[in-house]
């Protein structure tokens, strides 16, 4: 087999392995393979919005096992909008992640936390401290989810 044929075979195998399923079909939590004893965990995509008077925010989650990533955007009235991505972990009903965002022409990183309440995610707040240029929670056990932004389920934008 020539290198060109081997490359074509691998490319065809890769293309055939892509499923192209929608978010609701992607909801399967696990799929085991018969060739190996490893477990493949499929990602679930979920979208949420916060809306209050003139303020809004959106939260797009991609959860794969204990890992979570996604997009987060805030649009508060008479304040600079900030939009970015986050990467973190989900433990039980809590997400803890690093949010990298652009605001006022510069890039910043801060820790974010969300608590699952029914079908919603509520953002938690607490005292923060600077750790090598990243704003992190000073004491994660003292996070307050009572007055946090309440993100409700929403349709994911097309092309997510």
Image: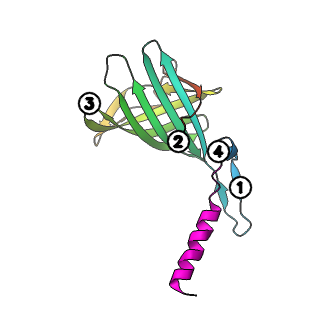
Q: Residues within 10 Å of mark 3 (few under 14, many from 20)?
A: few
Q: Nearer the viewer, mark 4 or mark 1?
A: 4
Q: Which residue is mark 3?
A: 104
Q: Is there CB contact under 8 Å for labels 2 and 4? A: no
Q: Which is nearer the N-term, disc 4 or disc 3?
A: 4
**Which residue has dot 1 on it?**
31
Mark pair 4, 1: CA separation: 16 Å
The numbered dot on residue 22 is 4
**Image position of 41 (left or right of 3):** right
109 or 11: which is nearer to us?
Answer: 11
Give the alpha-carbon distance from disc 1 to disc 2, as whole Å. 25 Å
Residue at (69, 52) in percent of width and height: 30
Disc 4 and disc 3: Cα gap in Å?
A: 35 Å
- Magenta span includes 2: yes
Left/right placement of residue 156 relative to residue 136 reads: right
Measured in 3D between alpha carbons, the distance from the residue under mark 2 to the one under mark 4, in whole angstroms, is 11 Å
- Of mark 2 and mark 4, the one earlier in the sequence is 4
> Considering only order in the chain, which callout, 3 or 2, is on the residue closer to the N terminus?
3
Q: Secondary structure at mark 2?
A: loop
Instruction: Indicate which label's residue lies in the foreground, 1 or 2.
Output: 2
State if disc 3 and disc 4 touch (CB < 8 Å).
no
Closer mark to the observer between disc 2 and disc 3: 2
Q: Which residues are magenta?
A: 1-22
Residue for badge 2 = 159
Q: Position of residue 105 (x, y in %)?
A: 25, 34
Count of marks overlaid on the render: 4
From the image, state whether disc 4 or disc 3 is nearer to you.
Answer: 4
132 versus 103 height, above or below: below
Q: CA distance from mark 3 to mark 1?
A: 43 Å
Magenta stretch, main secondary structure class: helix
Q: On the picture, is 134 further left or further right than 144?
A: left
């Amino acid at each position: 087999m020539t290198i060109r044929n081997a490359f074509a075979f691998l490319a065809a195998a890769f293309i055939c392995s892509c499923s192209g399923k929608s978010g609701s079909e992607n909801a399967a939590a696990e799929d085991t393979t018969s060739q190996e004893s490893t477990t493949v965990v499929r990602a679930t995509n979920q979208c949420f919005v916060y809306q209050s008077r003139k303020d809004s925010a959106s939260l797009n989650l991609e959860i794969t096992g204990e890992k979570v990533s996604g997009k987060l955007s805030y649009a508060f009235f008479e304040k600079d909008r900030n939009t970015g991505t986050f990467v973190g972990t989900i433990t039980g009903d809590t997400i803890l992640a690093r949010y990298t965002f652009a605001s006022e022409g510069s890039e910043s990183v801060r820790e974010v936390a969300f608590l699952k309440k029914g079908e919603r995610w509520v953002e938690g707040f607490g005292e923060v401290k600077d750790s090598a240029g990243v704003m992190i929670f000073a004491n994660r056990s003292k996070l307050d989810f009572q007055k946090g932004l309440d993100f409700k389920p929403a349709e994911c934008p097309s092309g997510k």
